[in-house]
Image (cartoon, rainbow, N blue to C red):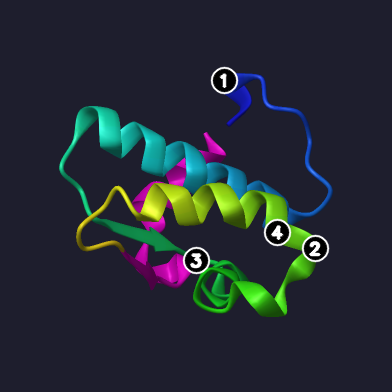
Amino acid sequence: MGTRNLRRRETALHSELEVLKWAMESMLQHSTCQRFGTNSKDLIAVIMNPQAWPKFSTELEVIQILQMCFSDFRISYFPRKQNEIADSLARN
């Protein structure tokens, strides 16, 4: 996200939602990918039950609109230990 010059968000979960939005927009332009992964259980909880997270309603509205563009949208949880390569890339 740093290379995109995005401003710092209120919480880590706000940042996670911004990254998911960016990933979804990118996949719509450059890939047929329908599945996304995260190491944030909270992100999945927000996506699965948006009414329980009113603080994120603005971000979730955009995510929900993007979801309609995917015929088989899925988001899965992957612990960091199972995703060491991506985690290493993010840190470096």
Residue that appears at 59% across and 53% down = 61
Q: Secondary structure at mark 4?
A: helix
Whether label 4 touches label 2, CB < 8 Å: yes
**Mark 2 or 3 closer to N-term?**
3
x then y, percent, for residue 47: 52, 69
Q: Secondary structure at mark 1?
A: helix
Pointer 4 residue = 57
Q: Secondary structure at mark 3?
A: loop
Q: Which residues are magenta?
A: 74-92
Pointer 1 residue = 3
Viewer-proximal residue, 41 or 87? 41
Viewer-proximal residue, 15 or 47? 47
In the figure, is residue 83 to the left or right of 65? left
In the figure, is residue 44 to the left or right of 54? left
Q: Secondary structure at mark 2?
A: helix
The residues tagged by marks 4 and 2 sit, at their Cα atoms, a distance apart of 6 Å
Give the label, 2 or 1, closer to the camera: 2
